[in-house]
Amino acid sequence: MIHCRKRQDHSPFLAAMDLEGCLIPEIWIALAQKTGISELKLTTRDIQNYDELMQKRISILNKHCLLLRDIQEVIRSLEPLEGAIEFLKWIRQRVPLVILSDTFYQFSMPLMEKLGFPSLFCHTLKVNSNGQIEGYHSRCMDSKAEAVKGLKQNGFSVISIGDSHNDLRMLRAANYGILLHPPPSIEENFRDFPSCHSYEELQKELREIWKESPSIKNLFPL
């Protein structure tokens, strides 16, 4: 398998992983299924410009008078993807892990609890006193890739794992980039990243990256 970057030193590994589609179901697709509003099925797999996507979503929510509490009720009914909890336990025993997501803290907490509260960097919604979503506050421009760059500057060899268009810059910024559960269009068009379709495949890919790392193999079996 070809990786987008190769490790050049002996710095410790850190994993930076997307949330929706990688560890939990797509929240907006679940909301679309619950409400019957098909327009809400659009994700970053469909629209590459995140701000354009979010403005469209907010407009749809307000058109249908959906409030934050309505979305949170749907989110509380969701469960992590099958095998996600076990995979998180496995990887967190071996390397530090941070979740880099374009979701919002007001959405994510019920699912973070089910995942054992891994570290999460995401955005914040702007909500008025009636519970209507008016907008959002991004941490920074290109937040996933910038977070990876910052982690590298702090001395880590970063492995990024994602599935959508908004993850590609994060994957390119990392020492190693891996696609997990990618749609066929992304897998076909971005063959410079290895694609994994299960946590078992992902574990195998990570073992290949880590096999020359004394800091990992001397502590845990790969």
Image (tube, rainbow, N blue to C red):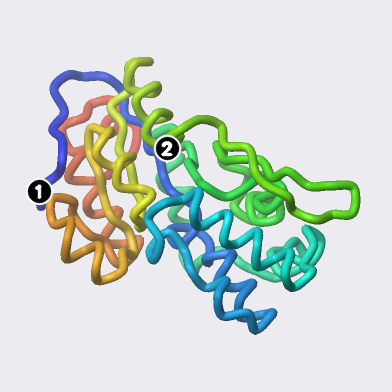
> Residue 127: x, y in percent?
78, 47
Return the residue nearer the eye: 217 or 138: 138
Measured along the vertical axis of the image, is residue 149 above or below residue 179?
above
Q: Residue at x 43, y 54 (%)?
A: 87
Tell me, for residue 33, which label it has, or none: none
Residue reaching furthest left?
A: 2
Position of residue 2 in the picture relative to residue 98 (left or right): left
Return the residue nearer the eye: 66 or 81: 66
Task: Find residue 17 and report its image quarter.
Answer: top left
> Residue 102: x, y in percent?
52, 47
Q: CA distance from mark 1 to mark 2?
A: 22 Å
Q: Which residue is mark 1?
A: 2
Position of residue 54 in the picture relative to residue 175 (left or right): right
> Residue 31: x, y in percent?
64, 72
Marks 1/2 in contact by CB < 8 Å: the verdict is no
Q: Is residue 73 visible?
A: yes
Q: Marks 1 and 2: which is nearer the front?
A: 2
Tell me, for residue 144, which label it has, or none: 2
